[in-house]
Amino acid sequence: MDIALKWVQGARSLPFVCGVRFMNVLLIGGSGSLIDSIIIKLKKEGHRISLLTGSRYTGTVYQKVFEKYNFTYDYTCIGDIFESVDPDLTIYLGAFDTNYRWREVETDAVKYSAGLMNILMSYSSRGRGRFVYLSSDEVYSGSYSEDIPEEELLTPVGVRGMALAQGEEMCASYRKNRELDLITLRLDHFYKVPKNRGEIREICGAMCLEAFEKHVLTVLPGRSFSLLYETDAVEFLCRLATCAKHEYEIYNISSPEVITQRELAELIQEAIGEPVVIVDDQPVSERR
């Protein structure tokens, strides 16, 4: 079936198909299944995808995009990339950017904040388009008996958590002072199937690794959380990022299903099929 395209005056030469707007999208972040899944999802919706990899290495494999820029975030040409792409939507992986391994946390925290600042300056200089920053539940610490609202005071623990929280503060400052369409999405206990040991950064992968290596799973009695799988995270992210209007500036993205750490340990114990001992650690109050 033929699809009729029409060009809409004042829409920066973006075509509408059956009332749906095609967008120029700039994705920013290192390689991995998350950014590849976002590329696939947005390409299926008809958007034109460009990619800033955050690395000078040209051999990294990504899903095919319209244009790929192999530059680090501190490079002076970042502003030129924004001018060239002219994005209607920019998505920065932030907390899930694989360019940061966080093995030398202090060094990576400095690079992370400086890189984000350069990206935000380049985005804001154009004064148009939507910017989405991905954060995580690491900006919170302690125990919560109820679901955490977006307006809850941030209480990060550790250098990485503080860097992510500082990133949120930078985004809030640009949003307020430059009146920009800038959204912060916090992905709660995000997890995926890792390709290798280096990709294990979340509780599911860490517990599986502990079970394989030590044949022991240490759990905190009373600890519970909601796990957000990669496929669901991408669906929520793309739906919010491409919507015509949004009501809030910050969104906590989570799953409605709550699981205790002991229940998760028992699922891992059953799946592995080898002797694994579950050991209780120091009790804590319920964490959501």
Image (cartoon, rainbow, N blue to C red):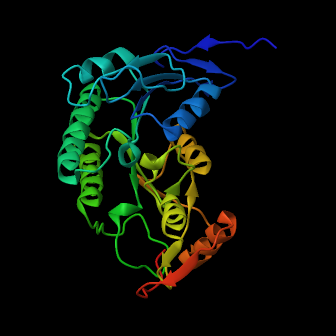
Tell me which residue sits at (54%, 25%) in the image. 63
Tell me which residue sits at (56%, 58%) in the image. 228
Residue 211 lies, in percent from the top left, at 54, 67
Q: In terms of depth relative to the viewer, which is nearer, 249 or 75?
A: 75
Residue 126 visible to an observer of this rendering? yes
Residue 258 visible to an observer of this rendering? no
Q: In terms of depth relative to the viewer, which is nearer, 215 or 70?
A: 215
- Is residue 210 left or right of 163 when viewed as pictured? right
- Is residue 100 left or right of 108 when viewed as pictured? right
Residue 85 lies, in percent from the top left, at 39, 18
Q: Is residue 35 above or below residue 135?
A: above
Q: In terms of depth relative to the viewer, which is nearer, 86 or 114?
A: 114
Judged from this view, the residue extending furthest toward the right is 1
- How many circles with numbers are drawn on the protein? 0
Tell me which residue sits at (26%, 23%) in the image. 78
Report the quarter where the N terminus lies: top right
Residue 117 lies, in percent from the top left, at 21, 39
Tell me which residue sits at (66%, 26%) in the image. 19
Q: In terms of depth relative to the viewer, which is nearer, 174 or 211?
A: 211
Q: Is residue 232 above or below residue 120?
A: below
